[in-house]
Image (cartoon, helix red, strand yellow):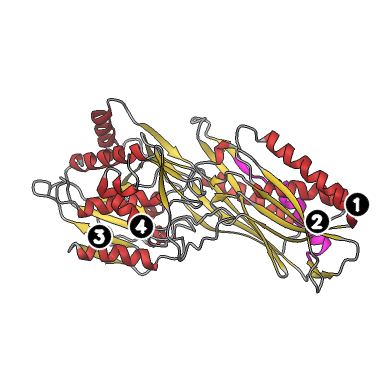
Amino acid sequence: MANSILDLKPANVWKHFHALTQIPRPSGHKEKVSAFIESFGKTLGLETLRDEIGNICIRKPATPGYENKQTIILQSHLDMVPQANSELNFDFTKDVINAYIDGDWVKAKGTTLGADNGIGVAATLAILEAKDLEHGPLEGLFTVDEETGMFGAIAVRPGFINGKIMLNLDSELDGELYIGCAGGEDVSAAFQYANETFVPKEDVVVKISLTGLKGGHSGVDIHLGRANANKLVFRFLKDALLTYNIRLASIQGGTLRNAIPREAFATILVDGKENYERLLKMVDYYQNLFNKEFDGIEDKITFKAEHLETPAGGLQLIPADVQRKLTHALAGCPNGVINFFAKLPDTVETSVNTAIVQSSDRLTEVKFLARSSSESKKQAICSSVESVFINAGADQVASANGYPGWDPDYNSEILKTMVKVFEKQRGQKPEVKVMHAGLECGIILSNVPGLDTVSFGPTIKFPHSPDEKVEIATVQKFWDYLTGILKEVPNK
């Protein structure tokens, strides 16, 4: 049995994936990983381009006898989602990922693994390095900052890539080929105010903690019905506000726009010890209620309250009217799956993720990510969220960073080739699907029209959460399939 991921097969892929785990590469910190990829290409003596934003394109000539094949682009993104369990002191800008083998899977200790999209990157590096593969002209396209807004894909232009076929290696279920995906857009709201300083005498300062949720990718996992920490904590806060007239000092829930929030924390003020004791019972009630409601979906939701010492200078409180507006808006805004495709009833068409709620001095911000394969439905759900916060009197409400979906092409030539190769290797047809998550394909296609594109990859579970894991056996299948496709690419 393998003791290290370096002992796994295919060795060339796992070697490069291990190298990536040793390079801190959270979204927004692209310098080291871009430099690594650029150096890799130049060391191999291959034509290596780098654009202004940090995207890398490495070109590899065809092997003898394959010069007449169409140029194929292997596309993947370099950044990873930085999510760690709260008890772990981990700095994604400095610390390396601690990957390990757990039965049939590779995981990371307490953090996201970065198999999304590190396995795709590693496979491309292995192909660029290989001297024993048969293929036509290749371009390895490595984009940056995908997870925070698809900024690398937005910058790709004709001439930086020349191929007419693009294989996106960022899908996460073995045996499935994706030919379409949802578009997305950020919605944000902000409340500005002057904090109130309160020096309580009999009042009790309490920290509310909601932890233990699974979280996950707000696209590919949204249909699982997992709990959203922000929605649950404001459900409780609304009840506590109405019952005990609590005051809210601070709130922090979620950290990333495209991850279902796993944890939320609030600091509140309770009127007197007697009401504090009653509040503890309310917290126990909600913990039991949440676990009952999400039985079979979540493992163990932990909801607790703990007494805090009052700061010497008093407690900074969010004004009562802002607290009321914020609480009702968060309790009432839409969240999760909005609708499924009428003709694809197992596929989500439209959703929204209540991603981040964070307060600081004189400001509380709320951030959402809306997704839909329908541009009009995407705009409709953005408008719905905006209306909730406009009606609540938020000082700033805006939608931004919209990106297009990817319309499926069921007559794709490379799709036909890939189906044939899959049937030849495995004796069955692959599933051809549309993904609810956002892939870079739609953006790149809008910038470089005419690309024939399919997305696929090995099985990766629970991306965007510390439970992320990649199934070892499917990485070998993915490699065999990818290299088999390269041999069968259509001629020019």
Q: Which residue is mark 3?
A: 58
**Disc 1 and disc 4 in contact, CB within 8 angstroms:** no
Secondary element at image label 2 = helix
Q: Which residue is mark 1?
A: 274
State left or right for residue 8 relative to residue 107: left
Q: Nearer the viewer, mark 2 or mark 1?
A: 1
Q: Nearer the viewer, mark 1 or mark 3?
A: 1
Secondary element at image label 4 = helix
What kind of residue is marked 2?
A: Arg
Classed neighbour count for the residue bearing mark 3: other residues with Cα under 10 Å, few (<14), some (14–19), many (≥20)? many
Q: Nearer the viewer, mark 2 or mark 4?
A: 4
Q: Is residue 44 above or below residue 339?
A: below
Q: Which mark is residue 159?
A: none
- How far is the residue under mark 2 from the one under mark 4? 46 Å
Q: Earlier in the sequence, mark 1 or mark 4?
A: 4
Q: Which residue is mark 2?
A: 324
The answer to whether any part of residue 164 appears in the image is: no
- How far is the residue under mark 1 from the one under mark 3? 67 Å
**Magenta-highlighted residues:** 317-337
Q: Earlier in the sequence, mark 2 or mark 4?
A: 4
What kind of residue is marked 1?
A: Glu
x, y percent for residue 128: 22, 54
Quadrant where the image shows the N terminus: top left
Q: Is residue 6 above or below residue 251?
A: above
Say which residue appears at 34% left-offset and 49% top-offset: 120
Q: Which mark is residue 20?
A: 4
What kind of residue is marked 4?
A: Leu
Q: Earlier in the sequence, mark 4 or mark 3?
A: 4
- How far is the residue under mark 1 from the one under mark 4? 54 Å
Classed neighbour count for the residue bearing mark 4: other residues with Cα under 10 Å, few (<14), some (14–19), many (≥20)? many
Q: Quadrant of residue 299?
A: top right
